[in-house]
Amino acid sequence: MNAPSRLTAPLDADTRAMVDRIAAQKGMSSADYAAEAIRRVAESDSDFDAFIQTGIDAADRGDLVPHAQVMAELDAMIEKHRARCPE
């Protein structure tokens, strides 16, 4: 595992108070809580970037669904829902 490094970020007073309060509730230091929060957001952003890249790669290969087909499938789903839900 890599050695930890420091990152400094300005926080407004309300955000700092929220971090301190939640960290205390979790029995963590504010620094550990902030590090975990940053890691979670970074992982989420990385996962989203990979998801988008999957779509770009599919489009580059020509693996696309025509707009008319997508709309027809959506219209069919809407009709199925309307049939189940009387007005």
Image: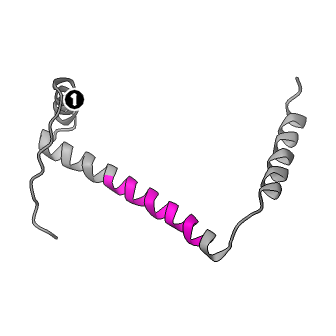
Task: For label 1, count other residues whose C-alpha is less than 10 Å away and answer few (under 14), some (14-19) or many (20+).
Answer: few
Q: Is residue 26 above or below residue 66?
A: above
Q: Is residue 42 above or below residue 13?
A: below
Kind of residue sitting beneath label 1: Thr
Name which residue lies at 89% across and 27% down. 86
Q: Main secondary structure of the magenta part?
A: helix
Name which residue lies at 19% across and 36% down. 23
Image-based side of 51 in relation to 28, left or right: right
Which corner quadrant of the image does residue 55 belong to? Answer: bottom right
Question: What stretch of residues is rendered in magenta?
Answer: 42-58
The C terminus lies in quadrant: top right
Q: Does the magenta stretch include residue 14?
A: no
Name which residue lies at 51% across and 60% down. 52
Label 1, secondary structure: give it.
helix
Name which residue lies at 20% across and 23% down. 14
> Residue 64: where, in percent of width, then height?
70, 67
> Residue 75: where, in percent of width, then height?
84, 45
In this figure, which residue is indicated by the disc labeled 1? 15
Which corner quadrant of the image does residue 26 belong to? Answer: top left
Which corner quadrant of the image does residue 27 belong to? Answer: top left
In this rendered view, identify the residue nearer to me: 87 or 53: 53
